[in-house]
Image (cartoon, rainbow, N blue to C red):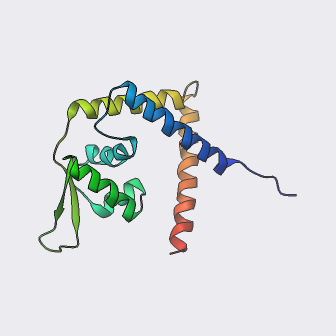
Amino acid sequence: MEKLREGGFLITKIHQLSQRIFSKLLEEYEIHEITAAQGRILFPLWKQNNLSFQDLKKKTLLSKSTLSYFLDQLEAAGFIERIHSEDDKRTISIKLIAINEKVKRKFIDVSKKMKKIYYKEFSEQQIDDFESYLRHILQNLMDYNNKKK
């Protein structure tokens, strides 16, 4: 009999619990302007402002409709704007228009706190190995997903 593995189940539990902890940390750090989900979109824009919709979709791995929903929220809150290309109106870039450095710094501090929680008592080599395994699993899932389209 094939041994049952728990990888997917454990990843799901980790995701659920880490989301709850991250949300609590946002409250503790008094970040009320953005949610954890919105931060998932802002974070890549903080690293590189003015990304195309497609690039942001790839970086976040969100579906088109989910990303659009969050972009609508962020646009309404005055954080981003959508810019249509002059050459091709179907091409949209996402640009930060209100970079609140205090919120950004606090959000990054929360991310650093999460890293400390995640990797407590891990060596650098263990972290590198673990993240390598996760990237491998992610690639396997993306390959499978792309074959099904």
Q: Nearer the viewer, residue 119 or 80?
A: 80
Q: Nearer the viewer, residue 129 or 54?
A: 54
Compared to 133, does 23 lie above or below?
above
Which residue is at 30% across, 46% downward?
Answer: 42
Query: Is 83 placed left or right of 130 in the picture?
Result: left
In this figure, what is the number of numbered marks? 0
Compared to 43, does 89 lie above or below?
below
Which residue is at 56% across, 48% downward?
Answer: 134
Query: Is 17 placed left or right of 64 in the picture?
Result: right
Which residue is at 61% across, 42% downward?
Answer: 13
The quarter of the image holding the N terminus is bottom right
Which residue is at 66% across, 48% downward?
Answer: 9
Q: Quadrant of residue 31?
A: top left
Compared to 44, does 147 lie above or below?
below
Name the residue furthest right: 1
Tell me residue 120's x, y (percent). Answer: 55, 25
Tell me residue 52's x, y (percent). Answer: 26, 61
Query: Is 131 placed left or right of 91 in the picture?
Result: right
Q: Nearer the viewer, residue 128 or 8?
A: 8
Name the residue furthest left: 86
Tell me residue 25's x, y (percent). Answer: 42, 29
Tell me residue 90's x, y (percent). Answer: 22, 73
